[in-house]
Amino acid sequence: MTTSKRHARTEQLLGEEGLETLKGAHVTICGLGAVGSFAAEALARAGVGHLSLVDYDVVSESNINRQLYALTSTVGQKKSAVAEARIKDINPECKVTIFDCFIDEETTEAILDRPMDVVVDAIDSLSSKVHLILNAKERGIPTVSSMGAAGKIDANAITCGDLSETQVCGLAKSVRRRLHRKGLYEGVRCVYSTEPSRKNPSTTGEEPSDDGFRVAPVLGSISYLTAIFGLKAAGEAIGIILKKEHGEGH
């Protein structure tokens, strides 16, 4: 398969300039779980030329119901390694950079102190999420942040907007509160749902969260819902990249 055929439909839609803009773009995706895996997939297929992937976790059997990289054959493998192999199979020209780590003060500097166009935040740990958003904002890097996707089933309730506009979502409310304490009130794009979460605590205790950054109470989730979150996040990221190229800001 030639490169031109690989991206022919994208070029037909966006034009040669638009495709070249995506090829020259760098997106960092933090968290390769139910949301981040689908965001990475869409960005790779769209032709984004450089993807940085941040996740330390391994695939577990309980991931199979919703995570793109979770298969019977990949259980026990590093999510970042599975992601890299899949992205390279989709687009061998895509540069993939792996950060096998948590998001904290030390690692954030290494991850963000590089030229990039957008950060996709697919972390569900509140402290890590807030830390990432603040540090990206300080560096002038646009962020697309995924809010709470667990406990929801209504695909039509998923939308995008500024974090300051979010409603219903408990995670978004908590993120807003912490960002307000740091003086950040707007300017963070996010994907969120206006559907109230279903309260369905698991009897199985705790397990690593979808993003791999903490141990968390198990919450119910379903395949299509989390995938839509990831795909919408990718769409927002691509929109930011294309607008920047045309000088429209973000």
Image (tube, helix red, strand yellow):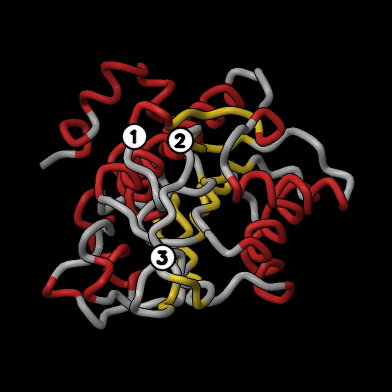
Q: Which residue is label 2 attached to?
A: 195
User: Which quarter shows the N terminus?
Assistant: top left
Element under disc 1: loop
222 or 59: nearer the viewer: 222
Residue found at x 52% / y 72%: 213
Tag of residue 110: none
201 or 44: nearer the viewer: 201
The reply to whether the C-beta atoms of the residues labelled 2 and 1 are less than 8 Å apart is yes
Q: CA distance from mark 1 to mark 3?
A: 19 Å
Q: Which residue is label 1 attached to?
A: 154
Element under disc 2: loop
Would you place residue 46 above or below residue 40 in this image? above
Please state the horizontal and vertical placement of residue 183, each as a whole percent of the image.
Answer: 89, 45
| Disc on the earlier residue, 2 or 1 | 1
3 or 232: nearer the viewer: 232
Tag of residue 201: 3
Which residue type carries mark 3? Pro
Which residue type carries mark 1? Asp
Q: CA distance from mark 3 to mark 2?
A: 17 Å
Within 10 Å of the Cα at label 1, are there few (<14), some (14-19), or many (20+) other Cα atoms?
A: few
Q: Nearer the viewer, mark 3 or mark 2?
A: 3
